[in-house]
Image (cartoon, grey):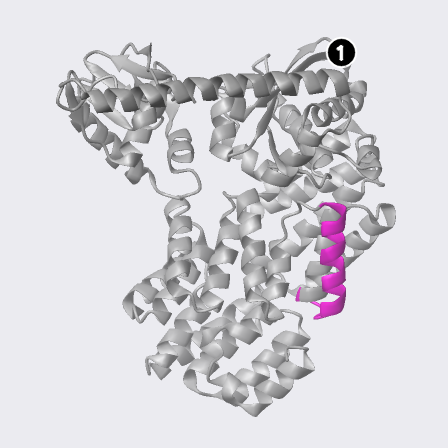
Amino acid sequence: MTNQNLFCFQFDDFRVEPRNYKIFHRDRALVLEPKTFQLLVFFLENRQRLVDKRELLDVVWKDIAVTENALTREVGKLRKVLGDDPKSPKYIETVHTRGYRFLADVTLVDAEPGVDSLSATGEEASGEEQNQDSTHTSFWRLKRVFVVLAILGLITVSAVFGRRPSLWTRVWAAKRGPTTLAVLPFHSLDGDPNDRYIGLGIADALITKLSNFAQLAVSPMSTILHYSDPWRDSLSIGRALNVDYVLEGKFQRLGDRMRITVQLLCVACNGTSRWAASFDETSKDLFQVQDSISQKVTAALPLELSRNEQAKLSRRETTQPEAQLASAKGKLLLDDDTKQSLDDATAQFRRALSLDPSYALAWTLLADASRRRELYGASPANFVPTTREALAKARDLDDKVAYTHSMLGLVAFQYDWDFATADREYRRALEIQPSWAQQWHARYLLATNHASEAEEEYRHFMRMVPFSAWGTTNFAQFLFLTRQYSRALDQVQKIVDAQPDYAPAHDLLGLVYEQQGLSDSAVREFRKAADLSNGYLGMASLGHLYAIQGKGTEAQQVLENLETPRKQRYVAPFERAVIYAGLGDTPKAMDDLKKAYSERSLSAQSLRFDPRLDNVRKDQRYHAFAARLGLN
């Protein structure tokens, strides 16, 4: 953003002083709420440019998830203060479905620090106030000189010691934690839509390579995809992501060659370039280019890499460019959360493996795709064996992939109930890649009664993957299971607002409403979940609610209805167990819980904490069963 200590914005008869959070119309001070003022400053900094709604939400509201209605309200407040007419705008133009553009000519004028350019009354300051302002101004000038000398000192140190590990680098790392980086999708200059996957593939490969260092936290591709608009400013994206640096790149086909330009921008330094380069290579040399970019980027950042970490810079997941591209396509499809996209992703991973059977990461991705069939009615008996087989191949080929060990931990915990192995695998994943975000580990921590550590793991995951619907849903489920219903409601409502057709969010929203005593709202959400999922979700929840309301006939009808889809899809016995628990039939509930465990579909955290099983937990048979499973 513009240096707010040095400049004010002037347009027409308005003057905006960002440093003082003040706006004046002629000689009269106006009042703006903090968010509205922040929105105005961002408009002024991006004047004459179409600013996308998503960008405004990301920058102005940062980590707070709000809907576009909040943005509309703030724009309305701002227009009212400026006297602007949305039908015939002079200042803020609405671009339908896209965003807004600030129309007026804006000039930057010098603002002497410590002195307001206009007072609220227009009267001259008293002699005492003038002395205070003079003292403040002198102090600021002295501070500015000190800052300049400090910068010159750093430049001198850099010139003397070059790129060797230095004291300021260590202080930087200790003070700020890991350096944060976003690698943006590389954009084609040819305008060919088919080149999109090439640009995403290059970025994905760099993200994978640069994610192996303890001092560097790299935003995952699933997050970056929300900022893939080639017309969007890289610096504003970096601010929205709250990262220290942004790596941007472009490429152009030149016959059998490809010209790639890349630049590393410092977000905190107003987009100052830390490093830039151009490469002109054949597609066969693409891996060499990726290696070179990774080495130059880590050299330009305030990092101290160990010998093992330096060796990772030349490590390659595959030797086949087409296999890498197929893997990148599959990962993008995997994040779409539909059955068709899951099938398409699986096909891409198999293609990658047909090109390079020794591609360990592709085997792990195939294993993850296999496991996700559970979300669409597959029985654990149908997908767990193929998941195990793919993971075993991945581990045999390369034992140093964090994703593989995290998946092995998930299988050990969720399907084998082997908590010791799960803990070992999760820890191994973090040893390999300290920045690895493991919401699966959070489930394990909750099931083993480490709720505070589980919440911190979820928060880390959501910082790394803020736009993941299933990630946010899992965090909301954690809050539900730990009886934090108000917080759970806030989280799940964000998902429903952002993705109204996401069935798991509606099912969970109904569960929260049920615990808050809002039965009518709960019924509405359960039915919505059932409609969106073709009956896969919501029905068992509805049956339990009927049961606790004393509607035994309706609850029994749901139990009968659950038998019908068993011919087409797997119905987890846990769904029947919660209905029997609501009916007060503890023996049948226990029978179904035991059956769910034998079929490897029982969730450890749900068994231990789901409030719908509270009456069942009063039975001694439950305690004996839980103890046998290791939930003491």
Q: Which SS does the magenta portion mostly show?
A: helix
Q: Is residue 92 left or right of residue 528?
A: left
The image shows residue 220 at horizontal and vertical percentages of 61, 38
Asked if residue 448 lies left or right of residue 112, the reply is right
Q: Quadrant of residue 159?
A: top right
Residue 337: % across, % down:
54, 47
Q: Nearer the viewer, residue 604 or 587?
A: 604
Q: Residue at x 81, y 29 (%)?
A: 320
Residue 622: quarter of image: bottom right
Residue at the image point whose x is 65% and y is 75% from the top:
597
Task: Based on the picture, tell me whether residue 395 belongs to the magenta stretch.
Answer: no
Which residue is situated farthest in the bottom direction here?
620
Amino acid on which disc 1 is placed = Asp
Nearest the camera: 211 or 576?
211
Circle 1 is placed at which residue position? 256
Relative height, residue 326 to residue 16 (above, below): below
> Magenta includes 424?
yes
Residue 316 is at least partly visible in this image: no
**In the rendered structure, which segment of residues is drawn in magenta?**
414-433
